[in-house]
Image (cartoon, rainbow, N blue to C red):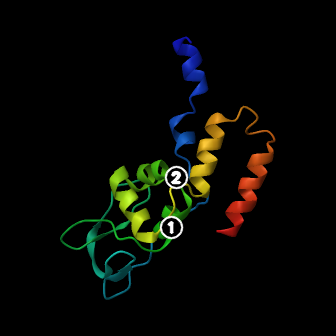
Amino acid sequence: MTTRARQSKQRPQIERFRLQFGPYAPPKVPRKNLLLCEMRGYLKVSPNWSDGLIPWPRRWRTGSIILCGDLVRAVKMEPVEAVCYHWGVCRNVVQNWRHALGVPEFNPGTSICVHESSCSMCPTSCIFCANVDKRAAHF
């Protein structure tokens, strides 16, 4: 297979990391500067937010991203690579979040991502794609 053929089969980077179940908005920080993290409980919020495509509040002193709000929904629904790309964290961090939330290895977003990379009928009409949309509604 030539290089040109390989490039045409690969999806563009933005397409590859698109969020399937978004949009996601950062949480509003209350006056007391405390947010409930799903992993660590109530944490004081730092004035510096993350530098990812979706800015997110960080923990005071350590600088770790606080697992709360729409980020919890994204971790449960989206593929690991998409969360890494949009929140600006490494794969290990997202895997730790998924483990803490009890997310299985294959969630709706991962299934769509794997299917689209192997399906020649997408994005036209495919029975599996319709079923994935129905399954995603149950989560």
- Residue at screen point 36% across, 81% down: 35
- Check disc 2 and report its element: helix, strand or loop: loop
Question: The disc labelled 1 sits on which kind of residue?
Answer: Ala
Residue 135 in the image: above or below residue 15: below
Give coordinates of residue 93: x percent, y percent.
Answer: 34, 58
Question: The disc labelled 2 sits on which kind of residue?
Answer: Pro
Label annotation for residue 3: none
Give coordinates of residue 126: x percent, y percent.
Answer: 79, 42
Give coordinates of residue 71: x percent, y percent.
Answer: 46, 67
Image quadrant assignment for residue 8: top right
Q: Give the side of residue 69 with respect to residue 29, left or right.
A: right
Residue sitting nearer the eye, 136 or 47:
136
Q: Give the side of residue 44 with respect to residue 3, left or right.
A: left
Question: Where does label 1 land, which residue?
Answer: 25
**Sequence-wise first label, 1 or 2:** 1
Question: Where does label 2 land, which residue?
Answer: 79
Near mark 1 (Cα within 10 A), the count class, few <14, some 14-19 or many ≥20, is few
Give coordinates of residue 86: x percent, y percent.
Answer: 45, 53
CA separation in Å, label 1 and label 2: 18 Å
- Check disc 1 and report its element: helix, strand or loop: loop
